[in-house]
Image: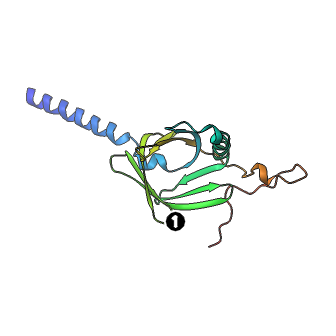
Amino acid sequence: MKKIATYLTLSSLMIGFLMLSSCKEKPQKLLIQRWKIEDVKISEEVPAEQKEFFNEMLKQMKQYLRITYREDGTYEANMMGNISKGKWEISDDGKTLTASDESNKPMTYTIISLTKDKFEYKTSDTVNPVMFTLVPGDSVTNVAPDMMDPNGGENPTTEEPTVQK
């Protein structure tokens, strides 16, 4: 009788463990959504003569860049109507993202953390790595300052422009 009780206890613990481990979302599922840049950290100080340009570029990326990862393993990056597409995959251990653009050149990134609310990764460059923090993105009107109409109005393009096939 004692063996049966021990067996039932161990079986219950195993089932509980399996249920808890199966509840954890896979990194691939967490990535599938639209993201926007929240922050970029570079490993070296930006030279003073380039700091203004870098800060303006970062500001525009935060405001206008959206990256959508899809379930079929494709992604689309949209920066003010300029669209680039490619393919992506996450390693089985969830620690590496590999993405390739239209030229099929693979880029490898180390995943720091990935939740439904935040995605942090860094480039694989060991000398000057760049760390990106992304958060769920919203739809934006792609209006850059140089796209303003001379009368002060906006000349917007939509977030999802029509792409000719």
Image position, residue 158 (x, y; %): 72, 56
Which residue is drawn at the image coordinates 68% and 40% (left, top)? 52
Relative side of 6 to 23, left or right: left
Quarter of the N terminus within the rendering: top left
**Residue 164: image location, x then y, percent:** 65, 71
| Foreground pick, 18 / 104 | 104
* Scheme of colours in the image: rainbow
Q: In this view, does 105 lie to the left or right of 3?
A: right
In percent of the image, x 66 and y 42: which residue is there?
59
In the orientation shown, which residue stands out farthest toward the top?
2
The residue where tag 1 is placed is: 102
Front one among 113 and 152: 152
Which residue is at a point 61% across and 50% down the rendered structure image?
66
Q: Can residue 107 be seen in this view?
A: yes
Mark 1 is surrounded, within 10 Å at the Cα level, by few (under 14), some (14 to 19) or many (20 or more) other residues, namely few
Q: Can residue 1 be seen in this view?
A: no
Quarter of the image where one finds residue 110: top left
